Image: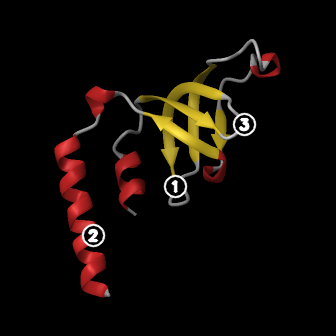
Amino acid sequence: MLFFSFFKTLINHTVTVELKNDIRIYGTLRSVDQYLNIKLDNIDIVNLDQYPHLSSVKNMFIRGSVVRYVVLPQAEVDTTLLEDATRREAANQANKA
């Protein structure tokens, strides 16, 4: 749930999503669910010369299992908060075991 909560804070920010088939999509993050499925608006295909059939697509729903990377804007990521949340999550998991 840590990643889900983290991605929820990035809604309405611009991200780049790289898929497992090497397509890179740049767009505005509109929603994310617990399976890390992603909905992007106002998309641009970064490597459009390789995928010209995607030139007319403006909105996209991406299944979480096909995502390789999500490139985030550095200014929007609070690393201190993320580190603290990771430590709390690890401590909670250790207490359950």
Residues at discs 1 and 3 in contact (Cβ within 8 Å): no
At x 39% / y 48%, what residue is drawn? 8
**Residue at mark 1 to residue at mark 2: CA–CA distance:** 22 Å
Q: Quadrant of the N terminus?
A: bottom left
* Residue placed under numbered mark 2 in the picture: 90
Q: Looking at the rendering, which quadrant does residue 80 occupy?
A: top left
User: Residue 83, percent across and down?
Assistant: 21, 52
Q: Quadrant of residue 22?
A: top right
The residue at 66%/23% (across/down) is 58
The residue pinned by badge 3 equals 21
Element at label 1:
loop
Amino acid, disc 3: Asn
- Check disc 3 and report its element: helix, strand or loop: loop
Apparent side of residue 91 relative to residue 59 in the rendered image (left or right) = left
Task: Looking at the image, tell me whether mark 2 or mark 3 is earlier in sequence order.
Answer: 3
Query: Image point 76% across, 22% down: which residue?
Result: 54
**If you read the primary sequence from the N terminus, does the residue marked by circle 1 or circle 2 appear first?**
1
Q: Is residue 12 above or below residue 46?
A: below
Image quadrant holding the C terminus, namely bottom left
Q: Residue furthest right?
A: 53
Q: Which residue is mark 1?
A: 33
Instruction: Give residue 2's position: percent from left, percent from top.
Output: 36, 59
Q: Residue at x 62, y 18 (%)?
A: 46
- Is label 2 in a helix, a strand or a loop? helix
